Amino acid sequence: MVIVWGSIEAKAEKIEEVMQLSLAHVQRSRREAGCISHSVQSDLENGSRLIFFEEWEDMQALQAHFKLAESQDFVASVAILAVGPPSMKIFTATQVS
């Protein structure tokens, strides 16, 4: 399993737009082959920051997700609404229980 943890901090006046784009991206991504889960949450300590958590069957599924025009468009769209570049960490994991 591949786990993705990421975040983006929206410009204060753009948070609603980033939230809408993020929710649409998450809902679309959940229908992709190999997606186990895909979610977005608000950071309670920073209302302009959104956190993404994703689980993918394997790296091949994640790479296919990254190659989709819709995924690339999402990243480009939110990047111009953010105070800085998004953060992303990718992990491989084995479930133990």
Image: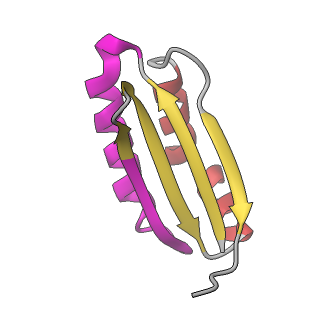
Q: Quadrant of the N terminus?
A: bottom right
Relative image position of residue 17 (x, y in whole percent): 30, 26
Q: Nearer the viewer, residue 75 or 95?
A: 95
Q: Nearer the viewer, residue 30 or 10?
A: 10
The answer to whether 27 is drawn above or below residue 85 in the figure is below
* Magenta highlight on residue 47: no
Relative image position of residue 24 (x, y in whole percent): 33, 47
* Image quadrant assignment for residue 34: bottom right
Q: Is residue 81 visible?
A: yes
Asked whether, in this view, residue 6 is left or right of residue 91, the answer is left
Relative image position of residue 73 (x, y in whole percent): 51, 36
Colour style of the rendered protein structure: secondary structure
In the displayed orientation, state which residue is furthest to the bottom: 97
Magenta-highlighted stretch: main secondary structure?
helix
Q: Which residue occupies 48% across, 19% down?
A: 82
Asked whether, in this view, residue 69 is left or right of residue 38, the answer is right
Question: How many numbered tags mark residues here?
Answer: 0
* Magenta highlight on residue 19: yes
Q: Quadrant of the C terminus?
A: bottom right
Q: Nearer the viewer, residue 69 or 75?
A: 75
Q: Is residue 68 visible?
A: no
Q: Which residue occupies 50% across, 31% down?
A: 8
Q: Which residue occupies 65% across, 51% down?
A: 67
Where are the magenta residues, as a range? 11-40
The answer to whether 46 is drawn above or below residue 29 in the figure is above
Relative image position of residue 38 (x, y in whole percent): 45, 60
* Image quadrant assignment for residue 16: top left
Q: Which residue occupies 30% across, 12% down?
A: 13
The answer to whether 6 is drawn above or below residue 57 in the figure is above
